[in-house]
Image (tube, rainbow, N blue to C red):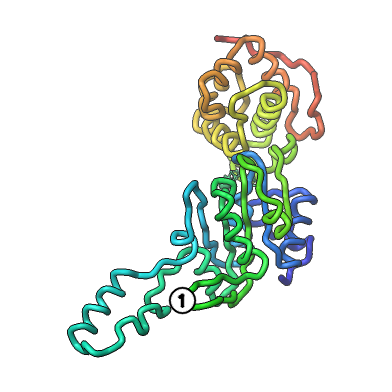
């Protein structure tokens, strides 16, 4: 780790990740202390992206273990290559019938590396992304402890394998399940909330610059209003804001209007009831008021209630 805090923040930014100080400090500490980083937050707030960006910052491979219910060690750590073992047995039986067949069968040669083992045995320092760890059950979580605290894994037939290079480990959780204290204790913890308007504008400007600062600010303000004032089944995340911005660009919009909002709202909200709630006349007017109250280039107007000329509501 040869970047200082400022350099890390700038390097992440250069690779397309907008981070506030808190976030950068926490990532920096995880890297410096060589501890796994556990990132928690709602879907789509930029958790997985941290691992990908770190891969780019350190110019190294990102090895991803996507978690799901029922994930087991065979899929996460290693498996024996049964077919090759069987083949070997067959050959030995035919050619040297008196040889000890089991000898050498559990050799590294017959090992199939899964993501965790691959990360441990890599000659270079890699980024190991253990994505959506809240989806696995508790025994699997406990199985991860050895890896997370000692950077080693045990394979009965081979013994303990220590990491050749300590990987940069990033775990993410959508918070569907409370993670165990044991897991949290082994990690540096980062919570990512929905961004405020300014941060979301910066992200939009980074990812969809073609929308222009004015439209991006309107999008961020509208999304911010929707998140903080409506009781939705599924809050729009940054991923949806980005999709929405791209959709508006595709329709050649340069300002937000009731009409283009209505036509693209399905990119922002994926639930029918949520959409109906937003398309309600009164709500739509409020969203537009907040979106247009945020003038391009003006910062910190989260609570601006200035009333411009509102386009006529059409629904
Ligand atoms: N701080 C950020 N800077 C730049 N892009 C971001 C940021 N946060 C989120 N994004 C973008 O939002 C989208 C969703 O992020 P992702 O990491 O996949 O979410 P999560 O893993 O939390 O569900 C991605 O396209 C990502 O690039
Ligand atoms: Mg993710």
- Residue under the image location 42 percent in, 78 percent down: 108
- Please say if 148 is above or below 238: below
Q: Which one is in front, 131 or 17?
A: 131
Q: Residues within 10 Å of mark 1 (few under 14, many from 20)?
A: few
Q: Secondary structure at mark 1?
A: loop
- Residue under the image location 54 percent in, 71 percent down: 154
Query: What is the quadrant of residue 254 in the picture?
Result: top right
Q: Which one is in front, 183 or 236?
A: 183
Say which quadrant the N terminus sits in: bottom right
- Residue under the image location 79 percent in, 51 percent down: 21
Q: Which residue is mark 1?
A: 157
Place of residue 144 in the rendered image (x, y in percent of width and height, measured from the top left): 59, 60
- Please say if 206 is above or below 153: above
Query: What is the quadrant of residue 226 in the picture?
Result: top right
Say which quadrant the C terminus sits in: top right
Place of residue 55 in the rendered image (x, y in percent of width and height, measured from the top left): 59, 62
- Please say if 127 is above or below 66: below
Q: Which one is in front, 123 or 315?
A: 123
Place of residue 279 in the rendered image (x, y in percent of width and height, measured from the top left): 58, 15
Residue 10: tell me if it is visible: no
């Amino acid at each position: 780790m040869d970047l200082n805090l400022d350099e890390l923040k700038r390097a992440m930014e250069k690779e397309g990740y907008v981070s506030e100080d808190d976030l950068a400090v926490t990532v920096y500490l995880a890297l410096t202390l060589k501890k796994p980083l556990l990132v928690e937050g709602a879907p789509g707030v930029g958790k997985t992206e941290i691992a990908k960006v770190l891969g780019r910052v350190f110019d190294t491979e990102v090895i991803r273990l996507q978690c799901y219910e029922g994930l087991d060690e065979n899929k996460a750590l290693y498996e024996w290559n049964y077919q090759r073992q069987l083949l070997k047995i067959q050959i030995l039986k035919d050619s040297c019938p008196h040889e000890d067949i089991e000898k050498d069968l559990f050799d590294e040669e017959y090992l199939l590396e899964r993501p965790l083992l691959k990360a441990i045995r890599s000659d270079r320092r890699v980024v190991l992304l253990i994505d959506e760890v809240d989806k696995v059950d508790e025994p699997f979580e406990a199985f991860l402890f050895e890896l997370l605290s000692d950077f080693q894994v045990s394979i009965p037939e081979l013994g303990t394998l220590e990491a050749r290079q300590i990987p940069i480990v990033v775990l993410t959780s959508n918070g569907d399940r409370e993670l165990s204290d044991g897991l949290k204790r082994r990690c540096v913890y980062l919570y990512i909330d929905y961004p405020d308007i300014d941060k979301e504008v910066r992200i939009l400007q980074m990812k969809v610059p073609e929308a222009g600062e004015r439209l991006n600010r309107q999008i961020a303000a509208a999304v911010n209003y929707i998140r903080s004032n409506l009781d939705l089944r599924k809050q729009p995340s940054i991923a949806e804001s980005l999709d929405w911005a791209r959709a508006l660009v595709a329709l050649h919009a340069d300002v937000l209007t009731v009409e283009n909002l209505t036509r693209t709202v399905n990119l922002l909200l994926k639930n029918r009831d949520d959409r109906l709630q937003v398309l309600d006349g009164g709500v739509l007017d409020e969203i537009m008021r907040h979106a247009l109250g945020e003038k391009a280039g003006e910062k910190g107007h989260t609570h601006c209630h200035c009333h411009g000329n509102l386009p006529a509501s059409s629904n």
